[in-house]
Amino acid sequence: MYIQNRLGLIEATETMMAQTRRLDQVANNLANVDTTGYRREDITFWEMLYKANNHPERVGKAIHDVTNLKEGALQQTNNPLDLAIHGNGYFKVETPNGERLTRAGQFLVNNQQQLVTQQGYPVLADGGAITVDGTDIAIGKDGSVSVDGRLVGTLDIVTAANLRDIQKAGGNLLQIANGGEEEPATEVTVNQGYLEKSNVSTMQEMTAMIDLQRAYQSQQKIINTIDDMDAKAISRVGKLNV
């Protein structure tokens, strides 16, 4: 009785912790529903066999974060510095922590006449920052950048050999993790005067939040039931007639 109840409490607690983490993700997704180029976050659950200290092996809950790379809808802005990628590709930008990827193409021109992100990170073209010192800025479907009719470079648009290696790096930035390999993106088009919206569905996230809250309450009921069973077992200890 004691061992079964203890395992039940552990299982219920682990499930509640996982649901809490998922609920945090849902809240974060909803908070970024209007963030340009934002990628929806999710987690996967599975069971794993592990052994802690000298205790026997048992099945526990394992969690893995997943970034949803589905393309968001394009919104026309007519701003020549707004860029959106159609297809499986990412702009490369230089950050204080190294090169990162992004789908948020709401770019600006800084005091050095460089194309930069909203955070001031230089957008990379041909391996370095690109200068757009002029009035007429035109970006081709292939990412080529022309200023006043003069070609000044081609934006670095890349992807990962294995899309599962693309992970969140904070905000609307991504990175290639797990030792993954970067490669040039093919079959992509750059749309000038457009922005890619977040790929978060408000209805989907709200439904997930309701389901998570119900599941969490169910685990609470399980814990209360196990507590009642333990209380009854303790109250019967030492009694001759049970």
Image: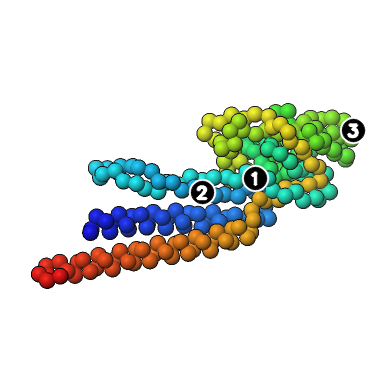
Q: Position of residue 203 (x, y in %)?
A: 63, 60
- Residue under the point 80% across and 50% down: 76
> In percent of the image, x 60 and y 57: which residue is there?
204
Residue at the far front in the pictured view: 242
The image quarter in which residue 153 lies:
top right
Q: Earlier in the sequence, mark 3 or mark 2?
A: 2
63 left or right, relative to 169: left
Tags 3 and 2 in contact by the CB under 8 Å rule?
A: no
Q: Residues within 10 Å of mark 1 (few under 14, many from 20)?
A: few
Residue at 42% in and 58% down: 16
Q: Residues within 10 Å of mark 3 (few under 14, many from 20)?
A: few
x and y, in percent, of residue 96 in the image: 61, 38
**Quick one: 97 or 194, which is closer to the camera?**
194
Q: Is residue 151 left or right of residue 93?
A: right
**Residue placed under numbered mark 1 in the picture:** 70
Query: CA gap, disc 2 to disc 1?
Result: 15 Å
| Residue 27 position (above or below residue 195) | below
Q: Position of residue 18 (x, y in %)?
A: 44, 53
Q: Which residue is located at x 24 percent, y 55 percent?
A: 3
Q: Which mark is residue 43?
A: 2
Q: Amino acid at mark 2?
A: Ile
